[in-house]
């Protein structure tokens, strides 16, 4: 009997397993595949995900495998630098191959004590008052108190639950791959610049060692049932750019669509959904993996509280209440970005207008905060603007704030030095006189770094401690 079984060891499942282990929850992760994926999709970790990695002491390990890039220029690939003064100590993008980040996150979960079994596909589930029975493809049955489907966009768990996944099917297909080119770099650069004036779903970017990352519309080529070929790329490059750049020696070739869907529910009894299992959208802006990782940080401590028995009654349901609107917003911004990539005159005109508007720092900041998820604010009640937002990594007397959040516990930052966490000290840490950088008297941080309370009154604090961390000991 496990406390939690997680279906899928992608980025979302691996992070969730690690978060649960911080609270000694017995976790088993079941991963269908025996080998890492063959595609080497390069994904970007945006500021909020980097903050979360820093919070758990993982950032240095991950950063060593990635390449830092400026935080700007991601909204609809409109080439604008990030606005000045972004509110994050990690205001950059870290480009990293997805298999590498998945491996690092899985290793982290295992280091913390999670069990991961590869080659185990979940094919059935049944839940009752005491737990969930999970059936594997080979007929084995396992039992746990909770099950979380982190099994990607085609989620078996979501289908078995019968949870609706409304939205739009894929209409626009894009080819993506890595290969070598047969013409000089200057020639590639000149042609790419000219074509990208009007065709924004196209690029050839040097990727080091003579290899180029190639993205080109798939329109009309190849059937979706078979993997794309080098000839598909050559044909499309000729159609779009008038030349195939002599591409050869592909490293990998893939195709992605723009299907956009959001799960109707994130929880049915003892079974929950997170990551792509709960939401899919086109990869423009590079937000999908980030969104899943952030789901896992939101869910981890709440599910752990439920398992450990201290969760207030409604805590677990705040997962859907908080995360579904965030996903809906990402779906909308990717819909908008896809429109802005269209070659039709209307969308091109809107793109030109938005490009001008992004010269206003406030507009640029608003869009950048959307893409980087640093602008997320959960509805935790009325109060100052900081309430419900995440707090940036500020310097405190003991070093960095995020260094104090490693163990996944709550934290009270008390400038008044008059308040106490009392009977919640087994779940919430206390830091008196933290820093002058905090311009409010006291802040209660949740384990995911979001502000749950601001004030200076002990009774009010106790009520909020009860709301988020249950009854005092
Ligand atoms: C071309 C492209 C570029 C992208 N670029 C970015 C980017 O720059 N930034 C970004 O944030 N996102 C990006 N994304 C999106 C990102 O790859 C996904 O959002 C991310 O992989 C979702 O993670 P996940 O863990 O939720 O699901 P997945 O990564 O799909 O992992 C699900 C796991 O579950 C396993 N599984 C499936 N079914 C079962 C089962 N029945 N039982 C057990 N295991 C099962 C699968 O084998 C898999 O390992 C991109 C996507 C594409 C297509």
Image (cartoon, grey):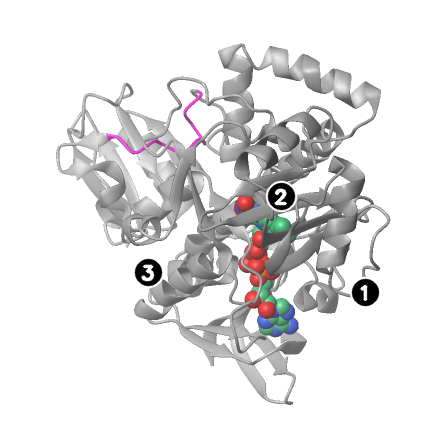
- Asked whether the viewer can see residue 100, the reply is yes
At horizontal 39% and vertical 50% (from top left) the residue drawn is: 470
Label 2, label 1: how many angstroms apart (C-alpha)?
A: 31 Å
Mark sitting on residue 22: 3
Q: Mark 1 points at which residue?
A: 225
At horizontal 37% and vertical 65% (from top left) the residue drawn is: 109
At horizontal 49% and vertical 46% (from top left) the residue drawn is: 207
Dot 3: what SS?
A: loop
Q: Could you classify mark 2 by the number of other residues whose Cα lies within 10 Å: few (under 14), some (14-19), or many (20 or more)?
A: many
Look at the image and give the residue range highlighted in magenta.
Answer: 385-394
Q: Residue 18 vs residue 361: left or right?
A: left
**Foreground label between 3 and 1:** 1
Q: Give the mark, 2 or 1, whose residue is nearer the N terminus.
A: 1
Asked if 184 appears above or below 277 in the picture, the reply is: above
Dot 2: what SS?
A: helix
Label 3, label 1: how many angstroms apart (C-alpha)?
A: 42 Å
Q: Could you classify mark 3 by the number of other residues whose Cα lies within 10 Å: few (under 14), some (14-19), or many (20 or more)?
A: many
**Image quadrant occupied by the C terminus:** bottom left
Mark sitting on residue 324: 2
Q: Does the magenta stretch include residue 386?
A: yes
Instruction: Locate residue 469, reporting x and y percent.
Output: 37, 48
């Amino acid at each position: 009997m496990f406390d939690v079984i997680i279906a899928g060891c992608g980025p979302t499942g691996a992070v969730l397993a690690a978060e649960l282990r911080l609270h000694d929850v017995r976790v088993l992760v079941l991963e269908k595949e025996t080998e890492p994926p063959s595609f080497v999709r390069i994904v970007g970790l945006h500021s909020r995900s980097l903050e979360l990695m820093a919070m758990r002491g993982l950032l240095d390990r991950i950063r060593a495998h990635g390449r830092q890039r400026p935080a700007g220029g991601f909204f609809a690939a409109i080439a604008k630098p990030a606005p000045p003064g972004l509110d994050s100590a990690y205001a950059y993008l870290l480009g990293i191959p997805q298999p590498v980040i998945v491996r690092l996150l899985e290793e982290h979960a295992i280091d913390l004590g999670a069990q991961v079994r590869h080659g185990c596909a979940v094919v059935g589930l049944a839940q009752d008052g005491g737990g969930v029975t999970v059936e594997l493809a080979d007929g084995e049955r396992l039992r746990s108190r909770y099950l979380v489907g982190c099994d990607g966009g085609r989620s078996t768990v979501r289908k078995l639950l019968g949870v609706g996944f409304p939205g739009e099917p894929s209409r626009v297909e894009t080819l993506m791959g890595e290969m070598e080119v047969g013409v000089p770099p200057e020639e590639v650069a000149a042609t790419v610049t000219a074509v990208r004036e009007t065709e924004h779903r196209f690029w050839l970017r040097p990727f080091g060692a003579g290899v180029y990352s190639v993205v080109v519309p798939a329109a009309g080529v190849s059937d979706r049932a078979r993997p794309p070929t080098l000839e598909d790329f050559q044909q499309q490059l000729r159609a779009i750019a008038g030349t195939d750049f002599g591409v050869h020696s592909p490293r990998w070739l893939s195709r992605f669509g723009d299907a956009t869907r959001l799960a109707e529910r994130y929880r049915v009894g003892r079974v929950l959904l997170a990551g792509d299992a709960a939401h899919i959208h086109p990869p423009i802006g590079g937000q999908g993996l980030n969104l899943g990782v952030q789901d896992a940080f939101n869910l981890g401590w709440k599910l752990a509280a439920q398992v450990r028995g201290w969760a207030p009654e409604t805590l677990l349901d705040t997962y859907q209440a908080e995360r579904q609107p965030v996903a809906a917003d990402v779906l909308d911004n990717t819909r908008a970005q896809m429109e802005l990539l269209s070659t039709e005159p209307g969308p091109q005109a809107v793109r030109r207008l938005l490009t001008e508007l992004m010269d206003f720092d406030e507009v640029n900041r608003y869009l950048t905060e959307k893409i980087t998820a640093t602008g997320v604010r959960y509805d935790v009640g009325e109060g100052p603007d900081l309430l419900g937002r995440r707090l940036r990594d500020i310097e405190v007397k003991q070093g960095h704030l995020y260094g104090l959040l490693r163990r996944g516990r709550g934290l009270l930052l008390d400038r008044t030095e008059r308040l106490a966490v009392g009977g919640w000290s087994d779940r919430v840490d206390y830091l008196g006189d933290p820093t002058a950088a905090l311009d409010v008297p006291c802040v209660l941080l949740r384990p995911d770094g979001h502000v749950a309370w601001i004030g200076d009154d002990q009774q009010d604090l106790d009520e909020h401690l009860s709301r988020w961390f249950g009854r005092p000991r």
